[in-house]
Amino acid sequence: MYIHQHTCISAQQTFGEIELNTVKESVNNKLLAVEPKYEGIPPGILRRMGKAVRLGVGAALPVIKNNNNIDGIIIGTANGGMEDCIKFLNQIIDYEEGMLTPGNFVQSTPNAIAAQAGLMAANKSYNITHVHRGLAFENSLLDAMMLLKENQEAKYLVGGVDEISTYNYNIDYLEGWYKKTATVNTALYTGDSTGSLAGEGAAMFLVSNNSSNAVAYIQAVHSIHTTDTTQLSSALQHFLQKNNIETEDIDILISGENGDNRLLKYYKAIENIVHAPAARYKHMTGEFPTSTAIAVWLACNADKLPAHMFKSGDNEAAPENILIYNNYKGMQHGFILINK
């Protein structure tokens, strides 16, 4: 399927005037999203929105505004508005199940992002949220691809969004998924320790079967659950063969390497097969389940990728075949093949 328009809100300057050469540094091992003014959202609605909903709707509205009659909104998120969910659960205890304010509950459900975008756009078409942890966005893409096979003239809004929730952060921190010592994102890949930096963000895409004025083409998406590097390597080789792509045809590998030494073996297994220049992005975004949405956004801007992203090699003058590989918590692996 073809991508026609894309937006991104992340910890870097990716919304509005894009600036990828300068990296905003992390604070307290977190990369917080640089939120815009959200000019398309009425103030009365904006102040009631949780952060994940703000990020998702704020990224979606510019795409929706420029495209009437979108045939569906498909969002991938692992946690949705978890912060508001915990606030609502705390209210149940504090008020002894008495007079609870509904705002936190309404904003806390994972489908609140897609629902709010649909309500603000008065879009009554297909509206769904995929909640599959580290493969939520990949499943959203697969959903859109299947729908486009059934509805050849349709166009869909597809996106991924997650926030840094205090409660979720603490749980993942205790499980060892975030750095225990102070680490700056500009030195994320130089250390040898477990964990990564927390991140958040949202990226949205308008997709269809129409190749006219497209900025990129998503050729295929594949996912696998395994902890075995041999199975992972076999899955990649089968994925490329199925799509008639030789390893030497890949111009850029966009890698989800995140500074966690436990996961490095998976990325090395992929790099041993794909010898293209490897571009890493999580020093810019931090680690979160749907970070591959931002990786796809970066692939749409592949000719502008800065030098600090490249682990090996450098940017091709006009990259054509781009492979995105991401690993989430050592178990979930996703491949996305994009043509420019």
Image (cartoon, grey):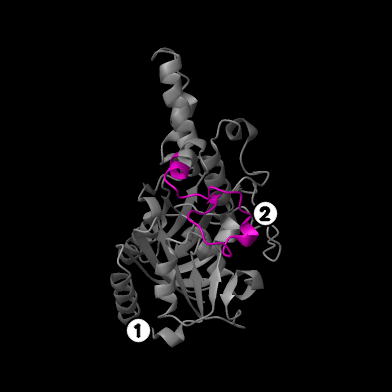
Q: Report the Cα–Cα distance between label 1 and label 2.
A: 40 Å
Graded by Cα atoms within 10 Å as few (under 14), some (14 to 19) or many (20 or more), the crowding at tag 2 reads some
Q: From the viewer's perspective, is residue 50 above or below residue 102?
A: below
Image quarter hosting the N terminus: bottom left
Q: Position of residue 280 (x, y in %)?
A: 55, 67
The residue closer to the viewer here, 188 or 314, is: 188
On the picture, is 331 further left or further right than 81? left
Is 179 a magenta residue? Answer: yes
Q: Position of residue 107 (x, y in %)?
A: 47, 33
Q: Which residues are magenta?
A: 171-200
Using the image, tell me which numbered label, if any, was put on residue 124: none
Residue type at the position of mark 1:
Asn
- Inspect this view and state whether residue 41 appears: yes
Residue appearing at x 55%, y 60% in the figure = 282
| Residue carrying label 2 | 25
Instruction: State yes or no: discs 1 and 2 in contact (Cβ < 8 Å).
Output: no
| Residue carrying label 1 | 244
- Inspect this view and state whether residue 81 appears: no
Q: From the viewer's perspective, is residue 307 above or below residue 10?
A: below
Residue type at the position of mark 2:
Glu
Name the element at disc 1.
loop
Q: From the viewer's perspective, is residue 63 above or below residue 277?
A: above
Graded by Cα atoms within 10 Å as few (under 14), some (14 to 19) or many (20 or more), the crowding at tag 1 reads few
The residue closer to the viewer here, 213 or 249, is: 249
Our reading of the magenta stretch's main secondary structure is loop
